[in-house]
Amino acid sequence: MARSSASSRPTEKEPGRFRQLWQVFKMTRRLDKRAVPYLIAVVILPIIASILVGIFTSDGNGFVIAIWVVAGVLLGILLGLIVLGRRAERAAYGQIAGEPGAVGAVLRSSLRRGWRGNEMPVAVNPKSKDAIYRAVGRPGVVLIAEGPKSRTNRMLDEERRKVSRVLPNVPVSVLHVGPDKDSIQLHNINRSLGKFKNTLTRAEVVAVSNRLSSLSGSQLPIPKGVDPLRVRPQRMR
């Protein structure tokens, strides 16, 4: 009876692509008041431009005008999806900005291809919850501090010395994510990583990442307050 009752329950279907887009749009509109004007502009302007180009270059040929209009609509939809994705990501990160573990969420979910990072910090201040994260890519090793510079600079120096001691020929760079004026915001982490100059090959990136992972030892606990990131606890053996 238990099996028959379980099998008779309707399975929950995942929302379709259009429903997911609508949910993302509603979330972005709620958190970002300027998202709707941006989306309207990037969708409408290509359509208007294509209509004008079609009228002035088609010599009255309706088929050519229609082709230009279709091209403008497709371009507008494409640009709208790109803008929606970026604004949604920015709005979502704005919700967890300042929370312990926010940098780890970025490294876990949206790190660009070619980079290796971990949501677990390599150093944590148990009192202030400030943390240092590490990403490895073709520019070398990048240490990302989460917290004010006045509290994280010493932790950064210690981690930089550790990495330089193990990998003396690998460049070590630093990023700050925090309340300081010259610090970067969460949604700018990937852009900032892309500004560093490449010095390693892809094979060397893998070797450096494996070397650092083998020396990290046991993982540090995630700072308290990282619940919005839905981090799964480790299983006890």
Image: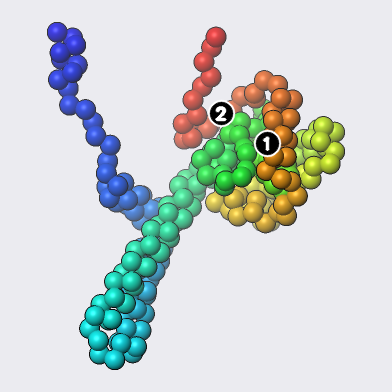
User: Mark 1 sits on what residue?
Assistant: 206
Q: Are marks 1 and 2 in contact (CB under 8 Å)?
A: no
Classify residue 181 by image quadrant.
Answer: bottom right
Residue lying furthest bottom: 59
User: Mark 2 sits on what residue?
Assistant: 224
- Look at the numbered disc 2 and give the secondary structure of its residue: loop
Is 214 left or right of 44, judged from the image as shown?
A: right
Query: Tag 1: Cα neighbours inside 10 Å, few (<14), some, or many (≥20)?
Result: some
Query: Tag 2: Cα neighbours inside 10 Å, few (<14), some, or many (≥20)?
Result: few
Q: Residue 84 or 181: which is nearer the viewer?
A: 84
Q: Position of residue 206 (x, y in %)?
A: 68, 36
- Look at the numbered disc 1 and give the secondary structure of its residue: helix
- Give me the C-alpha separation between circle 1 and circle 2: 31 Å
Can residue 195 be seen? yes
**Marks 1 and 2: which is nearer the front?**
1
* Residue lying at 52% horizontally and 15% vertically, measured from the top left: 235
* Residue lying at 27% horizontally and 41% vertically, measured from the top left: 15
User: What colouring does the structure picture have?
Assistant: rainbow
Q: Position of residue 205 (x, y in %)?
A: 70, 40
Question: Which mark sits nearer the N-terminus, 1 or 2?
Answer: 1
Is 227 left or right of 28, judged from the image as shown?
A: right
Classify residue 114 by image quadrant.
Answer: top right
Is 49 left or right of 186, judged from the image as shown?
A: left
- Quadrant occupied by the C terminus: top right
Q: Amino acid at mark 1?
A: Val
Q: Amino acid at mark 2?
A: Lys
